[in-house]
Amino acid sequence: MKIIESEKEYDALLAENKAVFVDFYADWCGPCKMVSPIVEKLSGLNTEVTFVKVNVDDNPELAQRYGIMSIPTLLAIKNGEVAGTVIGYRPEGDLQAVIDSIK
């Protein structure tokens, strides 16, 4: 799963991909570490969706763009628009349902 390094890289990714699942996280966040393996697994099962991670400490402008106040926040983006949001740790089935909404 790709880690976004800049706002420019993120914007290019959105322009190039119809369905994107974004994991907003921080290295120090316990719940982020719990949800990360689930997101990794789902990225392998949903190859038609592009999965990326955004470290909120390294990219505060992207977190601010979406009003991220709690992490992990997971966004399902379809055609550049947010189609679903999951805040905090959730089980695999809940995440898959949000991913299914952007396929």
Image: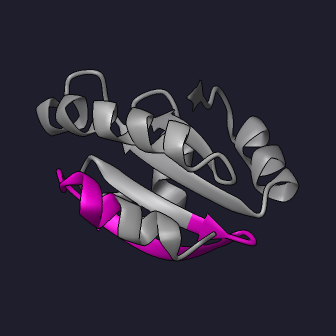
Magenta-colored stretch includes residue 45:
no
- The image quarter containing residue 38 is top left
**Count of numbered circles in the view:** 0
In the rendered view, does 17 fall on the left or right side of 74? right
Residue 46, position as x, y percentages in the image = 56, 50
In the rendered view, does 30 fall on the left or right side of 13? left
Q: Please name whichever residue, 47 or 57, is drawn nearer the observer in this view of the structure.
A: 47
- The image quarter containing residue 8 is top right
Q: How is the image coloured?
A: one colour
Residue at x 72% of width, y 69% of height: 80
Q: Please name whichever residue, 49 or 27, is drawn nearer the observer in this view of the structure.
A: 49
Q: Please state the extent of the stretch shown in magenta in the rendering.
A: 77-95
Q: Please name whichever residue, 70 or 49, is drawn nearer the observer in this view of the structure.
A: 49
Residue at x 83% of width, y 46% of height: 12
Residue 71, position as x, y percentages in the image = 26, 47
Q: Is residue 56 visible?
A: no
In the rendered view, does 77 fall on the left or right side of 40? right
In the rendered view, does 30 fall on the left or right side of 56? left
Residue at x 55% of width, y 49% of height: 62
Magenta-colored stretch includes residue 92:
yes
Residue 100, position as x, y percentages in the image = 50, 70
Quarter containing the N terminus: top right
Q: Is residue 102 above or below residue 19?
A: below
Quarter containing the C terminus: bottom right
